Image (cartoon, helix red, strand yellow):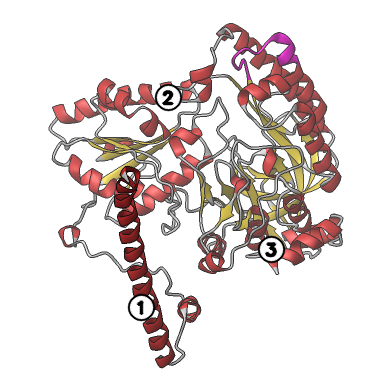
Amino acid sequence: MRSNLIKYPQFLRNFKRYQSTSVNLLKDDKETHQKEKNKRKLPDGPNLNHFLVNNLNSKKIFSKPKENVPYVKDVDFGSNRKVFFDVYGCQMNVNDTEIVWSILKSNNFVKTDVLEEADVVLIMTCSIRDSAEERIWGRLDYLRGIRNKRIKIGNRDMKVGILGCMAERLKEKVLEKDKTVDIIAGPDSYKDLPRMLALTENNQTAVNVLLSLEETYADITPVRLNEDSVTAFVSIMRGCDNMCTYCIVPFTRGRERSRPVKSILNEVKYLSDRGVKEITLLGQNVNSYRDVSNASEIFIPNTTPTHLAKGFKTVYKSKIGGLRFADLLERVSSVNPELRIRFTSPHPKDFPDEVLHMIREKSNICKNLHLPAQSGNTNVLERMRRGYTREIYLELVEHIREILPDVALSSDFICGFCGETDEEFDDTLSLIERVRYNNAYLFPYSMREKTTAHRRYEDNVPEKIKLNRLQKMVSLYRNIAETLNRQKVGELQLILIEGHSKRSKNQFQGRNDSNVKVIIPAGEIPVGDSNYLTDIKPGDYIVVQINDSSSQTLKGIPLYHTTLQDFHLKYKYVYPKCHDDYIKWHGGYLN
């Protein structure tokens, strides 16, 4: 009896739980029945797909209303203040400066080429090596002197801004060390410059170094610093995901993001219509371009993973979908067949066959590839986290030369990286000798704060040894380049005239397909096969017979004016389009 009394309360609790569950089930059944009854009363109407299709067709999907900011309406940030640009570093910095100038020009700033006249001096900086940053510190000392003189004689104060990579990397140090600086703006904050410059009028220091996951400046049309130039840079992507242990770029430029292809094509057409004859596509890892901005691809995604060159690997997972670099090359090269196309700076891993075949097919894409090796030793490459071995790199070189027999190769090399032994450095020399580059950019290692190498390794190769190794690399490369250039004597080459030679107004300089400088005398030459003579001028395609060479330049005799397409039809072997892999890729994706 006692045990039954103990169990009875448990029975009551179970029975109450059962009652509660039953009531809820009955309630759910009634609600479900009512929903079905109401559904039967409703006529068939538009579903989600209906709205998506209509929105895509009207091109209004994801449209963002123009923001109304009353407190900045009709504000004249520039007031005709004169701005002077001081540019250091890579081609990307030149392009960034053109973006900045476009932004400031639209806000009533005026550009000056005379430093002493400037109300604002903006220094576009580089942080890739310590020597680049030391030049900036020296420049700031010089500007401080000019500024103090202007203040003494009662002239308007001169504002100084640090832009770009050094601004992002050393913002605190710049503010602490140099009181000359009024503005610090990172690579993703250039649209904020008019507001920041307005703040400096009240003697405030303005800082914005936030990195963005989205900013590509696709909505900004750069204003070229030299509008007479027949060559131009077009930025197609920003940032880098490779995370090489020695490199500061991911920390100063942020993650990879690609500019929409439509924006790129619009800029290329704009430049072509204004007489530009050569475009260089720019990016920190230019051939990893992947545009995922197309609205239709959000709903009909391309599930193809990113292709890498055989044997290469990455620190990140394979990326899915989007328009790739080969697609972009095909579209850019089709804007104008007379527009020559280059690109820099690529990574060797991002040269799959579809890219190589596209370069082969298009006569206006230069057969000049940059393949940054950085080292010729597998152990050093592993410490650098490059994603390949010496053997894999050499296999890629051989494969490229099979597809592009006349290709001219260039490369980057670093000597004296953390722990590099004499034997490991010898592998770099042997790689340079084996590949035989037409051009090379050679540097001693410079450790950068924030990088993986700074956290993980010791910069233990003495500076004297680094410089000695650098001299060995330079000497070897120049001997090879001199030999390669000497082999060009007697050849007919097509060059694009860029302007007068720096040494003489009686000479012009241009570049051939391999990106080697060619010097020719000025004067009148025939147009094609005709007897009509006309002067050589910038922007002309000239057929030249090479008659002299050095390690850096070629010299030639100008024969006649031509077009890019006529030259290739007349002199160059036209590669067939029937390669199975190319047809499979071209037909399967672009169409």
Mark 1 packing: few (<14 Cα in 10 Å), some, or many (20+)? Answer: few
Residue at horizontal 44%, vertical 22%? Answer: 449
Q: Mark 1 vs mark 2: give the one in front.
A: 1
The residue that mark 2 highlights is 133
Figure check: 586 above or below 57: above
Q: Earlier in the sequence, mark 3 or mark 2?
A: 2
How many numbered tags mark residues here?
A: 3
Regarding residue 107, the answer to whether it shows in the image is yes
- Residue 446 magenta-highlighted: no
Instruction: Provide the residue designation for mark 1.
Output: 31
Image side of residue 468 versus residue 543, left or right = left
Q: Residue visible at 72% across and 53% down?
A: 542
Element at label 1: helix
Q: Residue 286 in the image: x percent, y percent?
A: 59, 46
Is residue 48 shown left or right of residue 328?
A: left
Mark 1 or mark 2: name the one nearer the start of the chain.
1
Badge 3 amino acid: Pro
The magenta stretch is: 415-426
Label 3, secondary structure: give it: loop
| Viewer-side residue, 501 vs 182 | 182
